[in-house]
Amino acid sequence: MGAIQKEVVCFRQVDKVYNTGTIALSQFDLSIREGEFISFLGPSGCGKSTALRMAAGLGNVTNGKVEVFGQDPKEVIRNTNDIAFVFQDANLLPWRSVLDNVLLPLELRGSDKKARKETAINALEMVGLKDYLKSYPRQLSGGMKMRVSIARALAAKPKMLLMDEPFAALDEMTRQTLQMDLLDIWKKENTSILFVTHNVYEAVYLSSRIAVMSARPGRLSKLIEVDLPYPRERTITRFNEYVEMASKSLEHSMGRRELV
Ligand SMILES: Nc1ncnc2c1ncn2[C@@H]1O[C@H](COP(=O)(O)OP(=O)(O)OP(=O)(O)O)[C@@H](O)[C@H]1O
Ligand SMILES: [Mg+2]
């Protein structure tokens, strides 16, 4: 842990064995710094979602330890709004309006009604949906639903945002727009983001670091520090060098080739 940057998440030699006997994580070691945007990249089944779930205090580790802000993540979830989760599916309640969907987690925390509404509207404004407060999820496109889901996560002003393939179901244009918006929000809010993706370009575009994972058992196979300024230009040589580096690490993690 650096002297200047605080650590937000620490996976210390984590093993996760599900009750089916599947070893989802084995000796998984990773320390994530405050304000980082870190992507987990790896083949299907390598334990990316499991790692995120452990950071959210969902389920127990088999061996080792996960700490968030130096505490047990279950305690952080129980006592604060510091951790928020965005899933691949927007997971909106169809009978609630856009505004009411974003209000839901705030209602559960029981803050003042007027303040809650203001917070929810601000979050929706941040994702460009201020004109859709009264709409229902069925009236929105896939990208708009994902924006609502992101607004719902942001409304509680989390210190850490966990995102599990949030843009996987979206078309390329929508995905790229949301990627840009997410980076703007990340900068403005100074949140630490843990982001799962299968997409090498997405990982290089977004992340300050990429954790490449290998499957069976799920381990950290390489950490790539992406030393490119934001906003990133997808066409420059250095961007593509990082894409190639990440692709090679990914192939290596799948046992297809040796690292050069
Ligand atoms: N609740 C569960 N019970 C039993 N096994 C599970 C459970 N959840 C995940 N697994 C297994 O653990 C391994 C890791 O799963 P995980 O969902 O973390 O992978 P992933 O990297 O997120 O994959 P994907 O990219 O397909 O989403 C897989 O072999 C999976 O079958
Ligand atoms: Mg997954």
Image: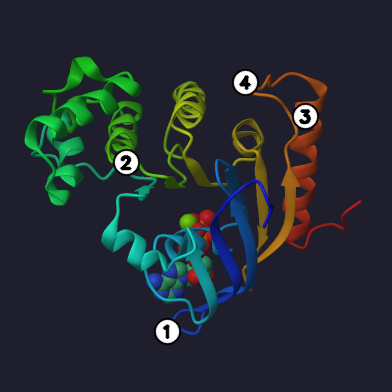
Earlier-in-chain disc, 3 versus 1? 1
Mark 1 vs mark 4, foreground winner is 4
Q: Amino acid at mark 1?
A: Asn
Relative to residue 100, is residue 50 depicted above or below? Answer: below
Which element is circle 3 on?
helix
Which element is circle 2 on?
helix
Question: Which scheme is used to colour this image of the protein?
Answer: rainbow
Relative to residue 260, is residue 129 depicted above or below? Answer: above
Mark 2 vs mark 3, foreground winner is 2
Q: Is mark 4 within 8 Å of ligand 1?
A: no
Name the residue nearer the viewer: 201 or 61.
61
Mark number, residue 19: 1
Query: Residue 92: horizontal and vertical position, in percent?
Result: 21, 41
Query: Residue 13: horizontal and vertical position, in percent?
Result: 63, 74
Which element is circle 4 on?
loop
Mark number, residue 231: 4
Earlier-in-chain disc, 2 versus 1? 1
Residue drawn 59% across the image and 46% down it = 39
Q: Label 3, on which residue? A: 240
* Picture mark count: 4
Mark number, residue 153: 2
Name the residue nearer the viewer: 136 or 129.
129
Relative to residue 64, is residue 254 depicted above or below? Answer: above
Residues at marks 3 and 1, CA–CA distance in whole angstroms = 41 Å
Horizontal placement of 33 versus 3: left or right? left
